Image: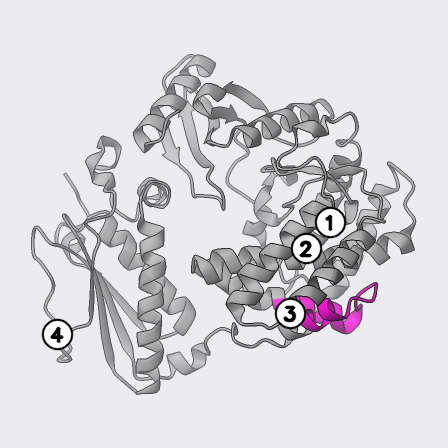
């Protein structure tokens, strides 16, 4: 079982050579997912593949089994090219770079017609995947459970309680809430739960190739209700789909589903909003663990739109059964304002300017302060695993994609940056309130080329996006060399 970056890349290269007949010329680590899986793009001999390393044997078995089954049903999922499960690796079809989430990032303030049309294609293919793809599927291979049953729901409720409600300081009556969630789970199981449930059906797991949707990362799938995946897609926190369009897509999905099996529209919709709520509860648990506990900024940013979704459901649909403590808890979540983003207009109109930079301890040392305020934060990156030790990265910098993904996958960089964000955010908020004019934040590594460059860029971007204050970035060693590294 490979563990280091070099061992994983070597194992995938050997598997690629067995499949393609040539050693890959490119082995590029891709941006990390929210799991322990590590992905690479491999190219050579005019062929390309996505290489996957995943130490979870049961997840691998589920994904490979599902993929081959769905391909046999003419469902748009990646083809499996080769596998070596003794090394926890496999090769799958490369579906390109474009996800449905990529389209959301470009949509602006409006929800354009072409995006609605794309979503319609997605929900049509979702119905096909769930209903036809679920037939003759070996659900015993599912991980961690065969079905999205009461136990699965209770696991999600517990994560919600202990990683979101507790960490967010939202009070609840434990016994009363426990009784309510049991009752709510039993109600939800009254829906038709006999089809394939993707489990994490959201825009990052939908690839768009030549205008057509393809699905990835369904290894957590199991038997369940049709409504759950549709709720996951249409109420994804950051998608910000206008409610009339959600309604349009809901009915378009039902129209697609009735081509495969009888669906009572009113009954489907009644259970649908219950599944919207349990999906919201599930994502709050994830955002609590990843955001409030692990302090990952992306998940913290997702909390306000998730709260807005719950607020809309409570105001417009309510809960389908009497669960008074669960209602009270959700109302407290809906009223919570502690996660609202910083007012960037306040930051932009403040006197504060932030200088962020990278430097080399070996060449020039800690840079002098030129503001007259005595300097600011200096962070040492030399303890972080250095991509510069490896030949493919020696002439690259912290701005190159392969170096960035190396640091995300194979180093402590992301955890380090979460701690840096936590420290500098407090200072910046305080300095804005006190009308300070300058703050400097510098990152040093041995050569000022990989780790410090990436860290400085990441922190500068974080400050601009969160606070709206002017940020000036200087990469001292790289600018001295004209970004040319021999």
Main SS type for the magenta part?
helix
CA separation in Å, label 4 and label 3: 44 Å
Task: List the residue tagged with mark 2.
Answer: 279
Dot placed on the residue nearer the N-terminal end, 4 or 3: 3
Q: Quadrant of residue 138?
A: top right
Residue at point 38%, 79% (across, down): 348
Q: In the shown orientation, is residue 242 left or right of residue 465?
A: right
What whole-number distance in Å separates the C-alpha atoms at marks 4 and 2?
51 Å
331 vs 366, nearest the viewer: 331
Q: Secondary structure at mark 2?
A: helix
Q: Is residue 314 magenta?
A: yes
Q: Position of residue 173 (x, y in %)?
A: 66, 70
Is residue 111 among what the camera can see?
yes
Q: Which residue is mark 3?
A: 308
Mark 4 surroundings: few (<14), some (14-19) or many (≥20) residues within 10 A: few
Q: Which residue is mark 1?
A: 228
Q: Secondary structure at mark 4?
A: loop
Image location of residue 9, percent across then percent down: 35, 27
Label at residue 370: 4
Of badges 4 and 1, nearer the viewer stands 1
Does the CB distance between marks 4 and 2 fall below 8 Å? Answer: no
Q: Is residue 174 magenta?
A: no
Residue 183, image quadrant: bottom right
Q: Mark 1 or mark 3: which comes first in sequence?
A: 1
Relative vertical location of residue 323 with respect to residue 129 in this rendering, above or below: below
Residue 134 position (above or below residue 248): above
Residue nearest the viewer, comparing 301 with 24: 301
Span colored in magenta? 307-330
Towards the viewer: 482 or 468: 468
Query: CB atoms at circles 2 and 1 under 8 Å apart?
Result: yes
């Amino acid at each position: 079982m490979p563990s280091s970056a070099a061992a994983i890349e070597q194992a995938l290269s050997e598997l690629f050579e067995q499949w393609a007949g040539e050693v890959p010329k490119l082995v590029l680590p891709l941006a990390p997912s929210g799991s322990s899986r590590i992905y690479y793009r491999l190219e050579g001999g005019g062929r390309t593949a996505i290489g996957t390393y995943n130490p979870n044997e049961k997840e691998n078995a589920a994904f490979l089994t599902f993929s081959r089954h769905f391909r046999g049903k003419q469902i748009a999922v990646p083809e499996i090219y080769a596998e070596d499960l003794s090394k926890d690796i496999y090769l799958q079809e490369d579906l390109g770079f474009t996800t449905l989430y990529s389209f959301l990032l470009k949509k602006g303030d409006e929800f354009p017609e072409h995006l609605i049309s794309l979503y319609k294609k997605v929900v049509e293919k979702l119905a096909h995947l769930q209903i036809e793809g679920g037939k003759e599927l070996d659900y015993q291979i599912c991980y961690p459970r065969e079905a999205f049953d009461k136990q699965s729901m209770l696991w999600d409720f517990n994560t919600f309680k202990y990683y979101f409600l507790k960490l967010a300081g939202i009070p609840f009556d434990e016994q009363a809430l426990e009784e309510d969630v049991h009752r709510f789970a039993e109600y939800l199981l009254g829906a038709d739960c006999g089809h394939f449930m993707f489990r994490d059906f959201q825009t990052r797991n939908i690839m768009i190739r030549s205008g057509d949707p393809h699905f990835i990362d369904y290894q957590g799938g199991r038997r369940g209700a049709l409504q759950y995946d549709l709720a996951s897609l249409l109420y994804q926190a950051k998608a910000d789909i206008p409610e009339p369009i959600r309604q349009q897509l809901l009915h378009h999905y039902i129209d697609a589903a009735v081509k495969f099996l009888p669906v009572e529209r009113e009954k489907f919709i009644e259970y649908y909003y219950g599944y919207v709520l349990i999906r919201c509860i599930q994502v709050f648990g994830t955002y609590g663990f990843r955001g409030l506990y692990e302090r990952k900024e992306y998940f913290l940013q997702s909390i306000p739109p998730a709260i807005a979704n719950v607020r809309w459901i409570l105001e417009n649909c309510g809960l389908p059964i009497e669960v008074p403590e669960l209602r009270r808890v959700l109302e407290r979540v809906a009223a919570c304002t502690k996660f609202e983003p910083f007012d960037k207009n306040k930051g932009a109109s403040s006197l504060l300017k932030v200088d962020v930079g990278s430097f080399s301890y070996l060449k020039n040392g800690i840079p002098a302060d030129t503001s007259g305020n005595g300097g600011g934060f200096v962070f040492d990156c030399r303890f972080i695993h250095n991509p510069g030790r490896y030949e493919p990265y020696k002439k690259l910098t912290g701005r190159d994609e392969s170096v960035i993904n190396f640091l995300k996958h194979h180093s402590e960089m992301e955890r380090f940056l979460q701690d840096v964000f936590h420290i500098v955010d407090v200072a910046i908020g305080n300095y804005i309130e006190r009308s300070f004019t300058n703050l400097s934040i510098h990152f040093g590594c041995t050569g000022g080329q990989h780790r410090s460059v990436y860290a400085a860029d990441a922190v500068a971007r974080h400050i601009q996006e969160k606070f709206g204050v002017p940020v000036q970035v200087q990469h001292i060693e790289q600018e001295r060399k004209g970004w040319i590294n021999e």
